[in-house]
Amino acid sequence: MKKKALKIYSLEDMLDKHIGSLGTPKREAFENELRLDLLGEAIKQARKDRNLTQEQLGLLVGVKKAQISKLENSLTDARFETIIKVFKALNAKVNFNVELLNQTVKLA
């Protein structure tokens, strides 16, 4: 009996097939949600690494425990300022990468 070879798909192929191609509204929504999930997980991990509860981190930042929980679980669109405050309270270095697609940016 001849075994049938398994077909291998790339992650990009699977995303295109099941979510949509890059640039489509559904794919953009998925990518944005994924970024928020990763941000929330980074906050949660940094908080745990520093042995802080959500309530303690909230006190350092000036927000309630519920807001920290929402950030960690990607349940809110937090203000950029709040996210920066959270990472500052966690003594974490933050790097943002901005790419302007299909554009050339010249600085004076």
Image (cartoon, rainbow, N blue to C red):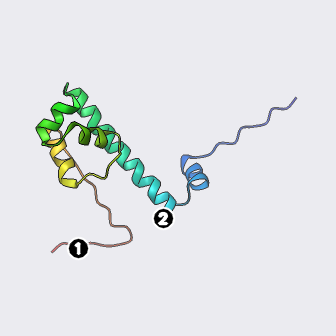
Disc number at residue 32?
A: none
Q: How far across and how far down the image is residue 58, in percent? A: 17, 37
Say which residue label 1 marks: 106
Q: Residue at x 35, y 46 (%)?
A: 75
Looking at this view, name the residue that lies furthest to the right: 1
The amino acid on which the numbered mark 1 sits, given as a three-letter code, is Lys
Say which residue label 2 marks: 23
Q: Nearer the viewer, residue 88 or 105?
A: 88
Graded by Cα atoms within 10 Å as few (under 14), some (14 to 19) or many (20 or more), the crowding at tag 2 reads: few
Q: Please say whether residue 91 is visible from this viewpoint.
A: no
**Residue 41 location, quadrant:** top left
Q: Nearer the viewer, residue 87 or 106?
A: 87
Q: Is residue 55 above or below residue 79?
A: above
Locate the C terminus and report the quarter of the image it occupies. Answer: bottom left
Q: Residue at x 22, y 36 (%)?
A: 65
Lower position in the chain sequence, tag 1 or tag 2: 2
The amino acid on which the numbered mark 2 sits, given as a three-letter code, is Gly
Q: Nearer the viewer, residue 71 or 93?
A: 71
Q: Nearer the viewer, residue 95 or 20?
A: 20
